[in-house]
Image (spheres, rainbow, N blue to C red):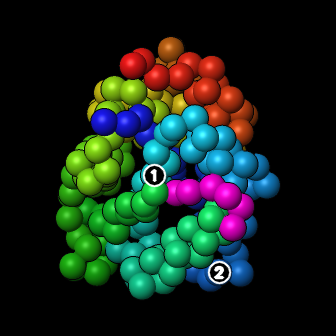
Amino acid sequence: MRPAVFLDRDGTINEDVGYLDSLERLTLFPYSIDAVRLLNGAGFCVVVVTNQRGVATGLISETFLHMVHDVLSERFRRGGARIERFYHCPHDPHAPIEQYRRDCMCRKPKPGLVLQAADDLGIDLTRSYVVGDKWSDVALARNVGATGVLVQTGYGTTQAKRLDRPRDAIVTADLMAATVRILELGTSE
């Protein structure tokens, strides 16, 4: 069993542009590839877990979503970094498209995506991290026994100011700062 770093997508590894509906709007943060390469080098499996309500509302298709993830995989690969796999939740309890209208176990902060990844990839969740720009990402970490890190990109700056934030939360400027913190903390063997 190996440790992993589960990354949120929009606002964490790439700019959050609302509903990403064209490849021209996909912009990686300049440090994302380097951060993932460092995590890979330290022995972490890197996995992206993302809520994609845009599918449930009909703003984007799952075909397009898979295309975005293929493009991201290739960009990271060309930069010498590896994202092991992408997992997404297309559901919403109030979705206008019936096939996506459900209260599922995969919508973060519920644990479904991470539990599936752990099963698929042989991941030890107690030695893993979840990094994202919303407190729901930190809550996801707690729900699976991992350590959560909030980044102050995307929605993170606003989220960090919330009065109801967890007292023991790890908050960093961005994914590179989160990576440095994770490498400092390491894993418990």
Query: x, y (%) of residue 51?
Result: 41, 59
Give the image quarter of residue 182: top right
Residue 15: image tag? none
Query: x, y (%) of residue 33?
Result: 69, 54
Amino acid found under the numbered disc labelled 2: Leu
- The residue depicted at 71 percent of the width and 33 percent of the height is 177
Q: In the structure shown, which secondary structural element does the residue marked by tag 2 occupy?
A: helix
Quadrant for the C terminus, please: top left
- The residue depicted at 64 percent of the width and 35 percent of the height is 179
- Residue nearest the viewer, comparing 102 with 14: 14
**Callout 1: 10 Å neighbours few (<14), some, many (20+)?**
many
Does residue 130 appear to the left or right of 150 in the view shown? left
Query: x, y (%) of residue 118?
Result: 29, 45
State which region is magenta.
78-83
- The residue depicted at 68 percent of the width and 29 percent of the height is 180
Q: In the structure shown, which secondary structural element does the residue marked by tag 1 occupy?
A: strand
Q: Identify the residue under disc 1.
A: 47
Q: Is residue 141 visible?
A: no
Amino acid found under the numbered disc labelled 1: Val
- Residue nearest the viewer, comparing 58 with 90: 90
Residue 23: image tag? 2
Does residue 18 appear to the left or right of 92 in the view shown? right
Does residue 131 appear to the left or right of 155 in the view shown? left
